[in-house]
């Protein structure tokens, strides 16, 4: 699996005529291992780069090649593996602790597509952010009314979590 990813990466870089520098390789490795979107500074720290600025320059380049994808959560910009490696994802973010749960829901994709078409536009993409309070934070919130999800809503949602 990892080997295939590396081959794919090398192929994309070569096709674009880009040099496979050690920083670029490191950043790609970090994105592969992360399993969740990371901040630029987190990527720089994990990539162990002697010059963080080279990491900062790598991400926009990766974005152009669809090796990486920008994810906006709140006011933060994070990065994860791009369309050349994974389908785009959506997240539910805990308002209290920032925990991120990834999900896929084909109905959401369908609705986003339909709504864009209904607006008279050719769909090119969408940014959807969902927020909530995670289970652990709910338990800590003894001072507030306990938040319980509406049971009918819970039953109708078919979501595959892999956060
Ligand atoms: Zn939380
Ligand atoms: Zn989507």
Image: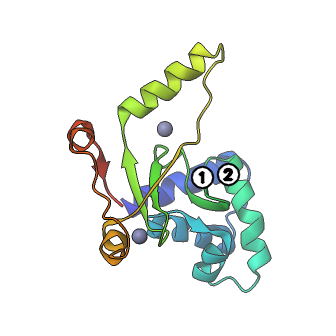
Query: Can you tell me which quadrant of the image ligand 1 is in?
Result: bottom left
Judge by depth and name the residue closer to the eye, 99 or 31.
Answer: 99
Q: Is residue 31 above or below residue 143?
A: above
Secondary structure at numbered mark 2: helix
Residue 91 in the image: state x and y as whole percent. Answer: 46, 53
Judge by depth and name the residue closer to the eye, 86 or 135.
Answer: 135
Residue that carries the numbered disc 2 in the rendered image: 63
Q: Are marks 2 and 1 in contact (CB under 8 Å)?
A: yes
Judge by depth and name the residue closer to the eye, 12 or 59.
Answer: 59
> In 3D space, how far apart are the residues under numbered discs 2 and 1 (Cα atoms)?
6 Å
Residue 36 in the image: state x and y as whole percent. Answer: 47, 64
- Residue at 60% x, 24% y is 123
Residue 69 in the image: state x and y as whole percent. Answer: 60, 51
How many C-alpha atoms fall within 10 Å of the one at disc 1: few (<14), some, or many (≥20)? many
Residue that carries the numbered disc 1 in the rendered image: 67
Colour setup of the view: rainbow
In the figure, is residue 36 to the left or right of 82? left
- Residue at 67% x, 64% y is 20
* Ligand 2 contact, mark 1 (Cβ < 8 Å): no
Residue 117 in the image: state x and y as whole percent. Answer: 58, 16
- Residue at 67% x, 76% y is 41
Numbered label tally: 2
Secondary structure at numbered mark 1: loop
Q: Is residue 7 above or below residue 127?
A: below
Residue 45, label in figure: none
Judge by depth and name the residue closer to the eye, 48 or 9.
Answer: 48
């Amino acid at each position: 699996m990892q080997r295939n990813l590396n081959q794919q990466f090398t192929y994309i870089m070569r096709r674009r005529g880009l040099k496979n520098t050690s920083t670029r390789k490191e950043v790609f490795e970090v994105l592969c291992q992360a399993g969740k979107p990371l901040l630029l500074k987190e990527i720089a720290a994990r990539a162990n780069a002697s010059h963080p600025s080279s990491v900062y320059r790598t991400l926009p380049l990766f974005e152009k090649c669809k090796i990486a994808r920008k994810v906006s959560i709140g006011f933060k910009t994070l990065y994860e593996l791009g369309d050349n490696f994974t389908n785009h994802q959506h997240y539910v973010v805990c308002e209290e602790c920032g925990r991120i749960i990834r999900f896929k829901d084909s109905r959401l994709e369908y609705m986003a597509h339909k709504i864009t078409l209904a607006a008279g536009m050719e769909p090119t993409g969408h940014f959807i952010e969902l927020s909530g309070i995670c289970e652990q934070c709910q338990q800590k919130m003894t001072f507030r009314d306990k938040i319980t999800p509406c049971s009918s809503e819970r039953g109708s949602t078919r979501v595959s979590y892999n956060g």
